[in-house]
Image (cartoon, helix red, strand yellow):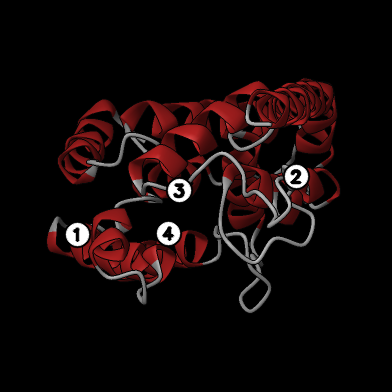
Amino acid sequence: MNKKAYALLEHYMCSCMEDSAHDKEHIYRVLYNALEIAGTEENVNYDILIAACLLHDIGRKEQYENPALCHARIGGEKAYCFLTENGFAPEYARQVEQCIRTHRYRRDEQPQSLEAKILFDADKLDVAGAIGMARTLIYKGAVAEPLYSVSADGIVLNGENDAKPSFFQEYKYKLEKLYDRFYTRRATELAKERQQNAVDFYNALYRETSMSYQYGRNELEKQLE
């Protein structure tokens, strides 16, 4: 990919990014992750991979405004239109679209091409480890969801079987389980290197909140006698 084409795609990407948890720096991290992974694979089409990385989250605004929409599908459609309208070959645009459509963490549409698998892995790496925890906290704050839920008897719930969304619920439902779901060897290695940071953070946060409630509620009852 030449610098002119890169600049065109980068400018369009920047014009679409409004979500603080999915900002342009997230895009760059995913791109850099993808390039590291691609360096350990053979026969990677870098033109497809770079474009797909740059444009993979351009449908976020539409999903934020209407949660019923899928940002991966919307983003793929937008990418295809943008690329073909700017002189890129339809077949190239279609392959980029397919990478974007399948990058989301779900089971109904899996990545097929090598470039799609690398994008998927690179994007999931940015949800792993400490940075994944930080991004999730930012997102939960943006949509006004709490750190945790509390049971009727005043116990801080660990998120395991929570019905209501929270940071702890997201950790147990998604973040804790993503480390064995990568397609490429290098991404799996990088994720494992980051995993303990996430585990330690969750355990510390749960321990601190639980102890605060346990001690504080007991003391409050004494004061109210």
Q: Give left or right: position of 96 versus 78.
A: right
Q: Give left or right: position of 75 versus 33.
A: left
- The residue singled out by tag 4 in the image is 96
User: Given contact means CB atoms under 8 Å apart, are the residues at marks 2 and 3 in contact?
Assistant: no
- The residue singled out by tag 3 in the image is 145
Q: What crowding class fits label 2: few (fewer than 14 Cα within 10 Å), some (14-19), or many (20 or more)?
A: some
| Amino acid type at image mark 3 | Glu
Q: Give the position of the N terminus as an image quadrant.
A: top left
Q: Give left or right: position of 219 versus 32.
A: right
Residue 103 spot, x, y in % from top left: 55, 58
Q: CA distance from mark 2 to mark 3?
A: 18 Å
- The residue singled out by tag 2 in the image is 155
Q: Nearer the viewer, residue 139 or 192?
A: 139
Q: CA distance from mark 4 to mark 3?
A: 33 Å
User: Given contact means CB atoms under 8 Å apart, are the residues at marks 2 and 4 in contact?
Assistant: no
Q: CA distance from mark 1 to mark 4?
A: 11 Å
- The residue singled out by tag 1 in the image is 82
* Image point (64%, 46%), residue name: 118
Task: Mark 4 vs mark 3: give the one in front.
Answer: 3
Q: Nearer the viewer, residue 25 or 146?
A: 146
* Image point (24%, 63%), residue name: 62
